[in-house]
C-alpha cells in the first residue's frame, strides 16, 4: 500500500526507488540518442580515458561475454574502438571514436540536466546535504567512477 506523500520513507525504499528514478532518466536520455542504457553507461565510463576489458567489466558489473557483446555492438555503431594496450601486447583497451566522443558529450550533458532536475523541489542547502549523504554512501561502498562529476568533465574539455 502506498504511503501518503507527507510520511517518512525508509532508507531502503528511498535508495531503491531513487535508483529506479535515475535508471529511468538514463533510459530516456539513451532513447533520445538511439542508444541502449548500457551503451550510454559504457560511453560515459570511457569519457575520461580508454580502459581494458577487465577494468570495464569490473566498473560496469558485467561478465566477460556480456561486456564483449556490448563492446561489439557499440563498435559496430562506430562509437568505440579496440586499440592495443601499450602495457600488455596481448590485451586491448576500449576507447571512444571521434563520433563516440561527440555523441557522449551530448548524451552526458542531457543526462546531467535531467538528473539535476530530479530534486527540483529541494532548496540549495537540502541539495548539498543530499549530495553529501549520497556521496558518503557511494564512497563508503567503493562504487567505481562510472560517471564523472560535471565540473571534472567541463575542466577536461576546457569549458
Image: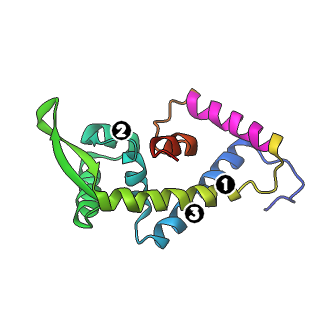
Secondary structure beneath dot 2 equals: helix
How many numbered discs sit on the rendered protein? 3
Q: What element carries label 3?
A: helix
Q: What whole-number distance in Å separates the C-alpha atoms at marks 3 and 2?
A: 23 Å
Query: Which residues are drawn in magenta?
Result: 126-139
At which x and y percent is residue 157? Answer: 45, 46
Label pair 3/2, CB-CB below 8 angstroms: no
The residues bearing labels 2 and 1 have C-alpha atoms spaced at a distance of: 27 Å
Residue 24 image label: 3
Q: Which of 118 and 157 is in front in this view?
A: 157
Q: In this view, does 38 lie above or below 123?
A: below
Which is nearer the eye, 96 or 17?
A: 96
Q: Which of 127 and 57 is in front in this view?
A: 127
Mark seen at residue 116: 1
Relative depth, front residue between 56 and 44 = 44
User: x, y percentage for residue 131?
Assistant: 69, 39
Pointer 3 with pointer 1, Cβ within 8 A: no
Instruction: Indicate the position of residue 152 as horizontal and vertical percent values.
Output: 52, 39
Farthest residue in the right direction? 6
Kindly state the secondary structure of the residue where label 1 is placed.
Answer: helix
Q: Is residue 21 visible?
A: no
Task: Kindly identify which numbered label has been placed on residue 58.
Answer: 2
Q: Which residue is drawn at 57% across and 29% down?
A: 139
The residue drawn where x is 54% and y is 30% is 141
Amino acid at each position: 500500500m502506498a504511503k501518503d506523500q507527507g510520511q517518512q520513507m525508509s532508507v531502503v525504499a528511498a535508495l531503491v526507488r531513487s535508483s529506479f528514478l535515475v535508471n529511468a532518466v538514463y533510459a530516456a536520455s539513451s532513447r533520445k540518442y538511439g542508444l541502449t542504457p548500457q551503451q550510454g553507461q559504457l560511453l560515459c565510463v570511457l569519457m575520461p580515458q580508454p580502459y581494458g576489458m577487465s577494468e570495464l567489466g569490473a566498473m560496469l558489473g558485467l561478465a566477460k561475454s556480456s561486456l564483449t557483446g556490448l563492446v561489439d555492438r557499440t563498435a559496430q555503431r562506430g562509437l568505440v574502438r579496440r586499440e592495443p594496450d601499450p602495457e600488455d601486447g596481448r590485451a586491448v583497451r576500449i576507447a571512444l571514436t571521434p563520433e563516440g566522443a561527440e555523441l557522449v558529450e551530448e548524451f552526458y550533458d542531457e543526462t546531467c540536466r535531467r538528473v539535476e532536475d530530479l530534486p527540483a523541489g529541494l532548496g540549495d542547502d537540502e541539495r548539498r546535504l543530499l549530495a553529501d549523504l549520497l556521496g558518503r554512501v557511494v564512497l563508503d561502498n567503493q562504487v567505481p567512477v562510472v560517471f564523472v562529476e560535471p565540473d571534472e568533465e567541463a575542466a577536461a574539455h576546457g569549458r
